[in-house]
Image: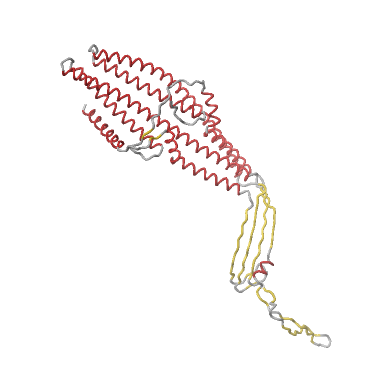
């Protein structure tokens, strides 16, 4: 009994503190289901993380497209050589310090490589589309979870109202019997039974408040909203639960879902991507043909030319003698002055161009190409199995939700009739209890049966709403709550 009182006191304190704090804010926002879903989609960390994958795939697609264009590279060098060396431009020995420059521009394009680059581009395009569908999968899962927690709050609100109404009735009876006991018209045992029932229902109210409080926290945590005590959701006027006017089977829902569900689209694209990956792997064992061209020039510090600004001098050199007179044979020799050939002239004169076709035929490379093909085949089989698993799971979810919705509808209809019967039984019992022809024990049992029936009715109601929401969602309809 002491543990019971402590539990009651502790829970009451928590709920009271929550009520006082939340009551301090009179202008808090009332969140609709759409508000909760939109906030979750904008702030969910998992979605934002997946969006980075989308951006990465966009870059990969752009790069694979650019890889099909010719490349163009340029380089330049500035070198000082010390000691004896052969100059590449004059083809002479140089023994002093020589400065040389080289400038080079080249371009290369692959004409054929087993269609690897084209297939890589197509693969990256498919991967981008698949990653975007993966984002939609996360959004759908979060939206469904938000709807579930939102409906749980509405369920707990109504459950709390039922508990409070039962407590109000019991409190009224307790007050009435107290007056009768004081007047000596009723037994004290009846008062004690009613007071015990009142205490039980007070605890039930506290438990319902606690469940409502926890469901508010759970929803806020789900949508990544900082937990606030004044968080409240809109309580819409829901339509009466009734069977769908149009007969829709689980098979019809499944066929529509197969055409629209992002997880199926993503799995199908993964299969296409694996097919492209296999085509790329087969390109490893194909010949490669490429075209390349280049232009280059350079400068050498030992390249010399006649200095036009300095006139040549004439020298007389004896080159031999005549026979038999032995007269000297003299020729005039022009002696020129030299200077280092200018930078611009050397760049012009040393210019060279080249163009060439290059064929590479793989003959043996450690079986790497065949291994890549086998790995690609295994990956293709894996994603095909994954598509089969996704299809199987989708069918199971739809069939289970359809069966649950049908069961919930039947349960709701039966619970509705039960509540109607229990209400009449309770009204009759209350009349008998008021005139003293029913004991408080029997009265309390009748009241408990009514409370249980009302709780079961609420549970069946919201279970049906959620299951039909799932079915509507898998048919491609947005998540919403039908209102009156």
Is 342 displayed left or right of 474 in the figure?
A: right
In the image shown, does 29 or 344 lie closer to the viewer?
29
Image spot of residue 387 (x, y percent): 54, 32
Is residue 189 placed above or below 116 in the rendered structure? Answer: above
Q: Is residue 470 in sight in this rendering?
A: yes
Q: Is residue 382 in sight in this rendering?
A: no
Q: In the rendered view, how is the structure colored?
A: secondary structure
In the image shown, does 172 or 253 lie closer to the viewer?
172
In the image shown, does 443 or 274 lie closer to the viewer?
443
In the image shown, does 20 or 250 lie closer to the viewer?
20
Image spot of residue 268 (x, y percent): 56, 34
Is 122 displayed left or right of 424 in the figure?
A: right
Residue at 66% across, 69% down: 344
Instruction: Determine which quarter of the picture holds residue 11.
Output: top left
In which quadrant is the N terminus drawn? top left
Residue at 32% across, 18% down: 450
Image spot of residue 351 (x, y percent): 68, 64
Is residue 108 placed above or below 447 in the rendered structure? Answer: below
Tell me how many marks there are. 0
Is 288 displayed left or right of 187 in the figure?
A: right
Q: Residue furthest top?
A: 437
Q: Which residue lies furthest to the right in this view?
A: 324
Image spot of residue 368 (x, y percent): 59, 45
In which quadrant is the C terminus drawn? top left
Residue at 52% across, 30% down: 476
């Amino acid at each position: 009994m002491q543990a019971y009182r402590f539990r009651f006191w502790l829970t009451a304190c928590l709920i009271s503190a929550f009520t006082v704090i939340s009551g301090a804010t009179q202008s808090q926002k009332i969140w609709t289901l759409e508000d909760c879903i939109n906030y979750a989609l904008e702030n969910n960390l998992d979605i934002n993380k997946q969006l980075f994958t989308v951006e990465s795939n966009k870059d990969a697609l752009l790069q694979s497209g650019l890889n099909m264009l010719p490349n163009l590279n340029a380089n330049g060098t500035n070198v000082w050589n010390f000691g004896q060396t052969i100059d590449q431009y004059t083809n002479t020995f140089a023994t002093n310090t020589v400065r040389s420059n080289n400038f080079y521009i080249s371009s290369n394009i692959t004409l054929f490589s087993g269609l690897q680059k084209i297939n890589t581009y197509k693969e990256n395009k498919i991967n981008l589309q698949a990653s975007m569908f993966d984002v939609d999968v996360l959004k759908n899962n979060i939206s469904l979870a938000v709807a579930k927690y939102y409906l749980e709050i509405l369920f707990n609100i109504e459950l709390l109202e039922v508990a409070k109404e039962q407590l109000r009735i019991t409190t009224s009876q307790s007050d009435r019997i107290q007056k009768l006991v004081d007047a000596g018209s009723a037994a004290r045992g009846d008062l004690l039974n009613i007071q015990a029932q009142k205490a039980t229902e007070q605890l039930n109210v506290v438990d319902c408040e606690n469940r409502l409080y926890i469901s508010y926290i759970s929803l806020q945590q789900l949508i990544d909203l900082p937990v606030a005590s004044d968080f409240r959701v809109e309580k819409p006027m829901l339509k009466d639960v009734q069977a769908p006017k149009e007969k829709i089977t689980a098979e019809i829902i499944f066929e529509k879902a197969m055409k629209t569900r992002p997880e199926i689209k993503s799995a199908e694209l993964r299969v296409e991507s694996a097919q492209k990956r296999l085509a790329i792997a087969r390109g490893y064992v194909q010949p490669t043909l490429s075209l390349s061209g280049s232009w280059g020039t350079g400068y050498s510090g030992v390249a010399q030319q006649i200095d036009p600004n300095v006139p040549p001098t004439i020298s007389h050199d004896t080159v031999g003698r005549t026979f038999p007179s032995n007269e000297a044979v003299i020729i005039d020799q022009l002696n020129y002055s030299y200077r280092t050939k200018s930078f611009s002239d050397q760049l012009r004169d040393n210019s060279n161009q080249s163009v060439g076709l290059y064929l590479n035929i793989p003959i043996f490379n450690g079986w790497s190409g065949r291994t890549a093909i086998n790995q690609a085949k295994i990956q293709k089989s894996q994603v095909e199995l994954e598509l089969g698993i996704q299809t199987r799971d989708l069918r199971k979810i739809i069939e289970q939700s359809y069966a649950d919705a049908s069961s919930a509808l039947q349960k709701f209809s039966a619970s509705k009739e039960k509540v109607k019967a229990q209400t009449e039984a309770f009204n009759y019992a209350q009349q008998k209890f008021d005139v003293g022809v029913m004991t408080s024990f029997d009265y309390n049992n009748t009241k408990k049966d009514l409370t249980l029936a009302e709780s079961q009715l609420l549970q069946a109601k919201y279970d049906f709403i959620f299951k039909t929401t799932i079915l509507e969602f898998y048919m491609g309809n947005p998540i919403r709550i039908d209102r009156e």
